[in-house]
Image: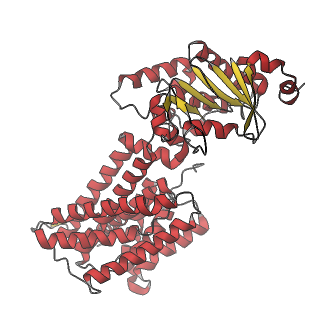
Amino acid sequence: MILQQLVNGLIIGSVYALIALGLTMIYGVLRILHVAHAGIYALGAYAGLVAYGLSQSFLLALLAAMVVAGAAGFGIQRYIYRPLFGTSPLVPLIASIGLFIFMEDLYRLVFGPNIIPLNAVWPSFALEWRGVKVTETQLVILLVTGLLLAFVWFFTEKTRLGLAWKAVAQDLEIAQAMGVNANLAVASNVVLGSVLAAAAGLLVAANYNEVYPTMGSVPAYKMLAIVVLGGLGNPVGTVLAGLLIGLVETLVVAYLGYKLPRDAIAFLALILVLMLKPQGLFARKGGG
Amino acid sequence: MRVEAGEWVSIIGANGAGKTTTIKTIMGLVTARRGKILFNGRDITNLPPWERVELGISYVPEGRRIFPELTVEENLRLGAFRLTNRDPRLKEGFERVYQLFPRLAERRRQLGRTLSGGEQQMLALGRALMPGPRLLLIDEISMGLMPLAVNQAFHSLWELNRQGMTILLVEQNARKAIGYATRGYVLETGRLVLAGTAAELAENPRVREAYLGG
């Protein structure tokens, strides 16, 4: 029983990790709390919904979601954040919140206010081992998040562009003076972050079989909590914090029931961490 | 203002005279409000900094500004960011810098923030040398360094200049800046007020009084 809960918790946690990782990457290079990231998450679900309806292929739906979200992310950094560069940090934050509200209402206008089921159909390949069951959807989630996390790791640690992201995150001005094309570094980073959010959105839509305009609202707050827990701008810490929150939520619900609302747990953790270790759970000693 | 190939030109001036702004404008980090910047006869006034790097301009910033959370090797790699991993000039760059500063080779895998001030200055200079630049822009190389490290830094520059590197240096330590230079300029509240060879400046009564301590 506990093993089953651990598996469930890690799987939902891996989705949290995916969406929060995108947010923390974008914060790293732009120093903007990109609240509209949750709008991109819902956009991924809607784009996937439409593409799945047309193609009946989850793989194509996933690709479509990532392409649409990547393009939207590019547009947001190019036409909203870049013109606001150099203003007080509050200005892009407010712009981001406004954009998020706009996106939710746009989805309502286009797709209506109701929950639309995704109805993804898989070939059956559920696993069962000693009573621990992993459903088809869960396996798909594990596979996709695992691949994407590995891809991001490879990209940031092993490529020139990844090095450019780190340099921009640490010192934008000097990175440019070393020959890093700052526009390209920022744009590529936001595009990849948005791709992760879109994948997370579609995976969650598949998991609960629902797509609706405000599906990004709770993740919007939760991803902020996770990113702060992980130490703002720290990708490894963020992934760990995402997994941790997924686990704790699942275990609390399983063993304490709904006395404590599931979605409150991340914030409880956030409050505790802010009080006891404000630099985040996984902050490095002396690191900035 | 002019800098000829192979020269060492120093700009001296008090705090707030516009020395750093001058250097940053040449690097492209500050936009020029008026006037033009020519490099090898080409107008670069509107080029972004990363394209100026490609033309052969390198920058050693005030306060060193090495990347604290990157290793020494990664810092140097960034200095030659425009070169792809397969470019033979990248390997040459590493060899050149490690030969000039063997200490950096020893500390290759250490994070930038764990280096001493003098080592960080070596790293900032080495990073700027990685792409094999034609012009080195140097902002306050002596700032925050112990006298011994200041001497070492100036000695490294002297050696580079002797081998043909063109240097434009801004510096509050006027004595050293003029002592090593071919020519110099004096900047006061954003204006060039004096220009001359290093010897002329060193003899100038105004410079002597204001910058060389009488």
Q: Residue at x 31, y 60 (%)?
A: A71
Q: Is residue A135 visible?
A: no
Q: Residue furthest right?
A: B214
Whole-percent x and y of residue A52? 16, 70
Which picture quadrant has residue B204? top right
Q: How is the image coloured?
A: secondary structure
Left or right: A106 as drawn, with respect to B131: left
Residue placed farthest to the top in the image? B162
B27 vs A146, left or right, is right
Say which of A35 and A10 sits in front.
A35
Quarter where residue A208 is shown: bottom left
Which one is in front, B179 or A189? B179
- Left/right placement of residue B35 relative to residue A244 reads right
Residue A277 lies, in percent from the top left, at: 58, 62
Q: Report if residue A20 is visible in the image.
A: yes
Give the vertical position of B111 relative to A182 (above or below): above
Q: Give the residue drawn at x 59%, y 43%.
A: B32
